[in-house]
Image (tube, rainbow, N blue to C red):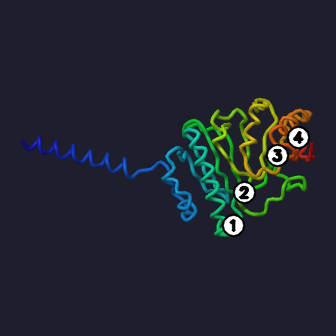
Amino acid sequence: MKKRIEAIILLATVCICILFVGCGFSSNSIDTSYEEWVNSLDLKSKKNLSVENYSEKDGTIQLRIQCKNVYGYRELSEVVDATNLFIDENPGYFGDSDISIIAVSGNRKQLTSLLAFSNKAPDSYVLDQNDALKDLQSGKVETIELYKMDLPEEVYTEDVNLKASVASIYFDYGSGISKESLGILKNIDGLEQVVVFNILDDDIDELCKMIWEYRPGIPVCECDINGEYRTHNP
């Protein structure tokens, strides 16, 4: 009888723990020194995305998010919007920190970066900002870096609207650039410039034409393998 009572108590305890974990735990909880900002993102309410990794190191803040479906990319856009609103309302809060909100795929042991929103001008060559690049001084997350062009199909639907003033793409082996893949550009609201890092050092006239099919008239800033910039206009 005593053993039965102990078993019942143990079972009840396990059930309570499961209930507690199911209601109170969220994979989108973050241990951060920027609590006010993270709280403003309301990540626990985002049911279609998950926080895969978060880090603060040497003036760099990186938030890696995996979107589960098309609604996840909508929620990603909401996270970016909330970040920019927070920056507007709290100038100087982040100091000179580099902020990146990165969409990833895979598992936590091996994550692949798909695209990243950042508050810094795209410059993989770590050069002084060139006049050809849009001058970004607001501190807001205004650039989108497209690491891969073969993005999940749902990113290209009309239901996804991302916001950025500058988009950067990489023209190199395995980049997966095609006319269809560039369709993501039409889903970026407020876009004012496209930066192409020309790793192959090939002519990008055809690439520019494909870009202009989706974003007519937008300037394309090319950075070649020597770190030199030139602007292409239609």
Name which quarter of the figure residue 141 lies in. bottom right
Q: Can you tell which of label 4 and label 3 is closer to the viewer? A: 3
Asked if the residue under mark 1 is in contact with the one under mark 4, i.e. CB atoms within 8 Å, the reply is no
Which residue appears at 49% of the width and 52% of the height? 45
- Sequence order check: which comes first, mark 2 or mark 3? 2
Residue underneath mark 3? 194
Mark 2 closeness class: few <14, some 14–19, many ≥20 residues within 10 Å: many
- Sequence order check: which comes first, mark 3 or mark 1? 1
Distance (Cα) linking label 4 and label 3: 17 Å
Residue 119, labelled with which disc? 2
Where in the figure is residue 221, as x and y percent of width and height? 88, 46
Distance (Cα) linking label 1 and label 2: 12 Å
Instruction: Name the amino acid, label 3.
Output: Val
Asked if the residue under mark 1 is in contact with the one under mark 3, i.e. CB atoms within 8 Å, the reply is no
Residue underneath mark 1? 95
- Relative height, residue 186 to residue 97 (above, below): above
Residue lying at the far left of the rendered structure: 1
- Can you say which quadrant of the picture contains the N terminus? top left
Residue lying at the far front of the rendered structure: 158
Instruction: Name the amino acid, label 1.
Output: Gly
Distance (Cα) linking label 2 and label 3: 16 Å
- Sequence order check: which comes first, mark 4 or mark 3? 3
Residue 61, labelled with which disc? none
Residue 225, labelled with which disc? 4
Mark 4 closeness class: few <14, some 14–19, many ≥20 residues within 10 Å: some
Q: Does dot 1 land on a helix, a strand or a loop? A: loop
- Can you say which quadrant of the picture contains the C terminus? top right
Name which quarter of the figure residue 149 lies in. top right
Direction from residue 103 to residue 188 in the image, left or right? right
